[in-house]
Image: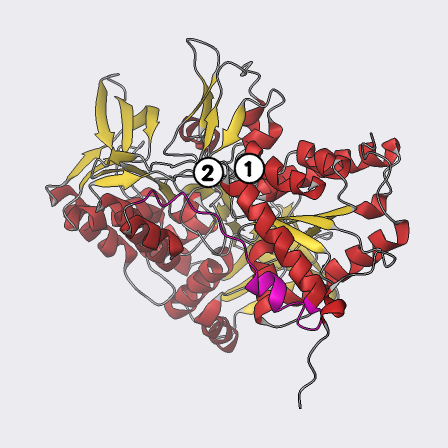
Amino acid sequence: MTQVTPQSDLVIKSSDWEPKIIAFLCNWCSYAGADLTGVSRIQYPPNIRIVRVPCSGRISPYYILKSLQVGWDGLLVSGCHPGDCHYLTGNLIARRRFAVLKDLLTFMGIEPERVNFSWVSAAEGERFAKIVKKVVEQVKKVGPIRKMVKTL
Amino acid sequence: MFQETIKEAGLNPYLFQMTNIRDQNSWVHMHEPAAATEKAKDLVRMAVAAARNLDPLQRQKIKMINKALVIGGGISGLNTALAFGEQGFKTYLVERETELGGYARNIFTTIEGNNVQKYLTDLIEKVKSNANIHVFTKTMIKSIEGYVGNFKTTVVQNPSGKESDFEHGIVIVATGSKEYQPKEYMFGEDPRVILQSHFEKLLHTDIDQLKQKKTIVMIQCVGSRNEEHPYCSRVCCVEAIKNALKMKETNPNSNIIILYRDIRTYGFKELYYRQAREKGVLFIQYEKEKQPRIEKNKDKLRVVVDNAKLGEISIDTDLVALSAGIVSQKGNEELAKILKVPLNDDNFYLEAHVKLRPVDFATEGIFLAGLAHSPKLIEDCIAQSLATVSRACTLLTLDTIESEGKISFVNSLRCTGCGLCISVCAYNAISINEEDGKAYINEILCKGCGACSATCRCSAIDVLGFTNQQINNMIFTKEY
């Protein structure tokens, strides 16, 4: 007889804290890369929630600040590799923008481990899984976000 | 696919939001059903949040003028124009010089022995006699306005100053490039130091003069692969070997010595390099840091070259042929500004993507071909011209073209006209309206990447289909 999973297993115990990470993926490279991870059945931790954007250049610093403010424990921004942008230069603009933003966030006391930028092409399913694993581990180490979250 | 179904059902296809529970959840968390279920709930929540602010979007239709403008009447421009003309598209060919033909007028044969001059004469004849092609010579581009499908160009004829206007749907840039004019090796000071192209001309027009020359030295990479011009000009090695073989054929007893840094006879042309060695052409390598030098000894010309293995070698010679590299046209900067297309570091025109869009510019409806893009051999120029024609015909054959649905738009009330959006737009889709000083987005050129929106400090620009409101909704689901 096959073992039926008891209902209680579906409930996550509150003591094992799991971070929630928001991932902004560009439509053409990283989002497709994440799809490939699935097609290849490569496993990674279920902590990320994906938001599809047309291009990493679309991602306003506002989204990142807001994400930290509403309590996402970490974030991942991923675009096409430099030089491969579907929109020619969007990822380069993003790279410049986020270099400055990350300095600012570090200055504000946000742990740099929470804020991650990477490049994943549509052919790099395995790389996407690796990056997610790394990001989840990093965020787990620094714990739940407190700094910018409104508590009142 | 889903959007097609929505459209068939009579709804606006943009009223659609997808979340990916399969590829990005169930397949990647196969052994964690509880956590995957939580994730699925979150993903659905986020998709619903985004869907709340979906708008029905429209694609704009604009007319396509089925005419082409080809700038440059060299081998590439002629081939492009002829291919358009033969397919029945009205084509304007604009050439700056008095004669058509471009740089190919200096080339007599290819290394395979094909007669370039005859080919060129035939080509020009075909272009001139094609009723669809209007040829302007001694004519400069004054302005090109508009966008894909609807360009308007003004040209000025020299020296009369007569202006003419015409409309067209696409633009081909085939402005070519030129031979480097050396400052090195006593070029211009001693008549026995000549350019490789001049040597080729002598070979084909004044062979008796050359027959008296016992020793000929060729120097490769003149003005190439140095700080000023770091790239390889591709054609010079082939050119030198072609002329060396021809000279050997004319006078087997002549000594031909080629001083080179690296011989690169591209593709199967390597066979001619071997042939030249078999025929007794001498190849001596020099290093970039130790350029050969020319000494004038009374009436003798002496070339001194330093070879890593052989040491310093002196060669008394009757003639020195300099294989000068290819450099970009001076006018490139001006035309690039008119067309708003980019140039690379060496002032050649830069394609949209070296692999994915090799003959397109980033700006829709503008294409490039030939030496204007990079140094290349005649057969490469012809192949590239035909590639350009087939790319351009995907537009020329249409009656109307459609814009993207998901594009940026400006909230004029918020716009301060700072122009930051213009600087990040890769498609030149944004301009400041002179009347009200606000940013204006060309709906045809915009591809909807959103770089402008994320750059705008007044939040005046948003992207349809990926609005700030929608993305914020998704971020805020964390609070639920």
Q: Residues within 10 Å of mark 2 (few under 14, many from 20)?
A: some
- Residue A50: % across, % down: 63, 51
- Label pair 1/2, CB-CB below 8 angstroms: yes
Picture quadrant where residue B28 is located? bottom right
Chain part drawn in magenta: B11-33
Mark identifier at residue B54: 2
State which quarter of the image contains the N terminus of chain B.
bottom left
**Label 1 sits on what residue type?**
Gln
Q: Nearer the viewer, residue B180 or B343?
A: B343
Q: What chain is tagged by disc 1?
A: B
- Residue B388: % across, % down: 33, 50
Residue B14 located within the stretch drawn in magenta: yes
**Label 2 sits on what residue type?**
Leu
Q: Nearer the viewer, residue B115 or B193?
A: B115
The residue pinned by badge 1 equals B470
- Residue B106: % across, % down: 35, 48
